[in-house]
């Protein structure tokens, strides 16, 4: 698997979707959702963008010898999908879908991706 490409493409897609979904919430959903729901949706989009930045940065730094970058990519990608995706589903279904337990799991994976990046940067000779 080409992890450099995975990181760069998934970072670009997450970033693009973050902008599209954030704009959709600000314009198309503004009159349909409560302020709290819009704030939750915006939080999902914002954290999704943070993970997009992380993935692009890791993709730029990626070399085959840097073994810790592979799990960072997976933690960031899966964490963003679980965290932001569950928030979007909760807001758009007005809580009908019971995916709230997925949100903190995604958040933990996102935190782990950043922590592992910090550990990698501390340990590697870069």
Image (cartoon, rainbow, N blue to C red):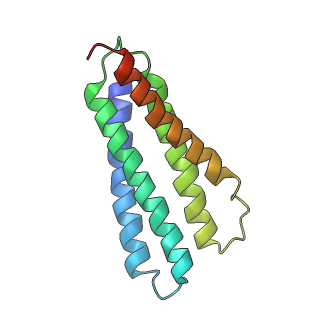
Residue 65 sits above or below residue 118 on the image: above
Please tell me how many numbered marks the rendered image carries.
Answer: 0
Estimate the x, y position of residue 102 in percent, counting from the top left.
66, 51
- Quarter of the image that includes the N terminus: top left
Judge whether residue 111 can be spotted in this image.
yes
Q: Identify the image quadrant of residue 33.
A: bottom right
Left or right: residue 85 versus residue 95 is left
Residue 120 sits above or below residue 36 on the image: above
Hey, which residue is sitting farthest front in the picture? 122
What residue sits 36% from the left and 40% below the top?
A: 54
What residue sits 36% from the left and 65% below the top?
A: 20
Nearer to us in this view, 100 or 117? 117
Estimate the x, y position of residue 118 in percent, counting from the top left.
40, 29
- Quarter of the image that includes the C terminus: top left
Judge whether residue 1 can be spotted in this image.
no
What residue sits 50% from the left and 68% below the top?
A: 41
Estimate the x, y position of residue 96 in percent, counting from the top left.
72, 71
Nearer to us in this view, 12 or 44? 44
Hey, which residue is sitting farthest bottom in the picture? 31
Nearer to us in this view, 11 or 112? 112
Residue 51 sits above or below residue 58 on the image: below
Left or right: residue 64 versus residue 102 is left
What residue sits 59% from the left and 71% below the top?
A: 91
Estimate the x, y position of residue 51 in percent, counting from the top left.
41, 45
């Amino acid at each position: 698997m080409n992890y450099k490409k995975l990181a760069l493409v998934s970072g670009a897609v997450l970033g693009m979707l973050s902008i599209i979904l954030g704009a959709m919430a600000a314009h198309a959903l503004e009159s349909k959702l409560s302020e709290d729901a819009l704030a939750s949706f915006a939080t999902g989009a914002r954290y999704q963008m943070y993970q997009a930045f992380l993935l692009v940065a890791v993709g730029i730094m990626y070399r085959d010898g840097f073994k810790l970058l592979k799990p960072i990519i997976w933690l960031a990608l899966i964490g963003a999908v679980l965290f932001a995706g569950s928030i979007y589903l909760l807001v758009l279904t007005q809580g009908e879908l019971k995916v709230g337990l997925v949100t903190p799991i995604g958040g933990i994976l996102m935190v782990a991706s950043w922590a592992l990046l910090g550990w990698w940067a501390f340990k590697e000779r870069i």
